[in-house]
Image: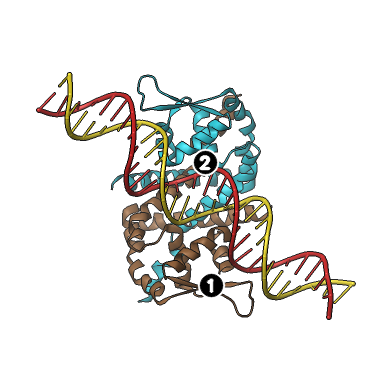
Chain colours: A cyan, B brown, C yellow, D red
DNA sequence: GCAATTTATATTGCACACAATATAATTGCG
DNA sequence: CGCAATTATATTGTGTGCAATATAAATTGC
């Protein structure tokens, strides 16, 4: 086993690891803020989508968030149990489940307004750096989405 | 609720979401390759650390991978059950658990040699782009590690 | 028009992640 | 020395993530 081979398997040589670790750490950083809203981080993402455009089907949420029904179905049931969303079979297509906001779910948006700002402070990333990094991560996300779709 | 407020809560405005989605997608992309080694993605990360430096205590693994004992303990038990590592209480400090590689665990490194290259192909990221993005993600990881440590 | 295929969601089983807590070993301090 | 505080790991409980599979509704082909 040559030194070169070893190098490729070093933790520091990986792109995947800082991505993985940063994602975990960011979720952890969100937690105290989201606790006040009674949301987990993936639940927060679902609410972000719904605050922009409700109702949305499970499939639409799945496509936008890159999550499958095995993740979304129980998550949405918990949001429903919390009184934030309603799930209803579509009338035109009974296979589809439409997720809509309850008044309580809509009202929660006001409480969420401070979160992006508060997180920005906690991370302490400059405006330009923030925008650049977001753009690169968006690119990576799309790249990986395509790579996964190929198989 | 003004338009400006709305904007900050849009999914596309977030830094966190592409990070989260890219991390999930990358784990998914690793799966078929790691299945051949009988490893999950977090298990692969643990093995990367051990292939570089074994034995390592649970605490050292925890610090390097930003994972806590609640995640590592059962994961390490599964690696042990698979015959890849050994867990033993340290003689000098009985609180510590030293994780070392079995011959089978050491041998698995050879099978893992192709993985970084194969993943590089699948992602299709140029050499310079790869290095730059890795560097930025490493910076973000460290930034978030500090932000989390502050509380 | 109806059987075969496709599509949309749900269910099951396994492996993370992590907060909160528990337990046991070591250290520190009077 | 003796015991309180600290440190290292384990346990418990909840909520993801996702592959594999199941189910039911819609669509397609003949």
Instruction: Tell me if A5 is positioned left or right of A151 in this view.
Output: right
Residue at image point 54% right, 66% down: B61
Label 1: chain letter: B
- The residue closer to the viewer here, A119 or B65, is B65
Neighbours of disc 2 within 10 Å: few (<14), some (14-19), many (20+):
some
- Give the labeled residue for mark 2: A42
Q: Position of residue C20 (x, y in %)?
A: 67, 51
Residue at image point 33% right, 58% down: B33
Q: Position of residue B36 (x, y in %)?
A: 32, 61
Q: Assign a secondary structure to mark 2.
A: helix
Residue at image point 61% right, 29% down: A108
The disc placed on residue A25 is: none
- Give the labeled residue for mark 1: B56
> From this viewpoint, is residue A124 visible?
no
Q: Position of residue A131 (x, y in %)?
A: 51, 42
Find out whether the residues at labels 2 and 1 contact each other: C-beta distance under 8 Å. Answer: no
Instruction: Tell me if A58 is positioned left or right of A31 in this view.
Output: left
Q: Assign a secondary structure to mark 1.
A: strand
- The residue closer to the viewer here, B5 or A1, is A1
Label 2: chain letter: A
Please, is residue D2 above or below residue A139 in the view?
below
């Amino acid at each position: 086993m040559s030194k070169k081979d070893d190098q490729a398997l070093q933790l520091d040589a990986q792109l995947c690891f800082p991505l993985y670790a940063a994602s975990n750490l960011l979720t952890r950083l969100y937690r105290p803020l989201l606790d006040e809203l009674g949301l987990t981080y993936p639940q927060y993402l679902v609410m972000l989508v719904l605050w922009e455009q409700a109702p949305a089907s499970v499939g639409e949420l799945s496509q936008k968030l890159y999550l499958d029904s095995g993740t979304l179905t129980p998550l949405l049931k918990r949001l429903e149990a919390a009184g934030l969303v309603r799930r209803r079979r579509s009338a035109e297509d009974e296979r589809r489940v439409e997720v809509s906001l309850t008044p309580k779910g809509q009202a929660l948006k006001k409480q969420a307004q401070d979160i992006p700002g508060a997180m920005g402070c906690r991370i302490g990333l400059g405006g330009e750096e923030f925008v650049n990094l977001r753009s690169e991560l968006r690119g990576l996300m799309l790249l990986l989405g395509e790579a996964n779709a190929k198989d």
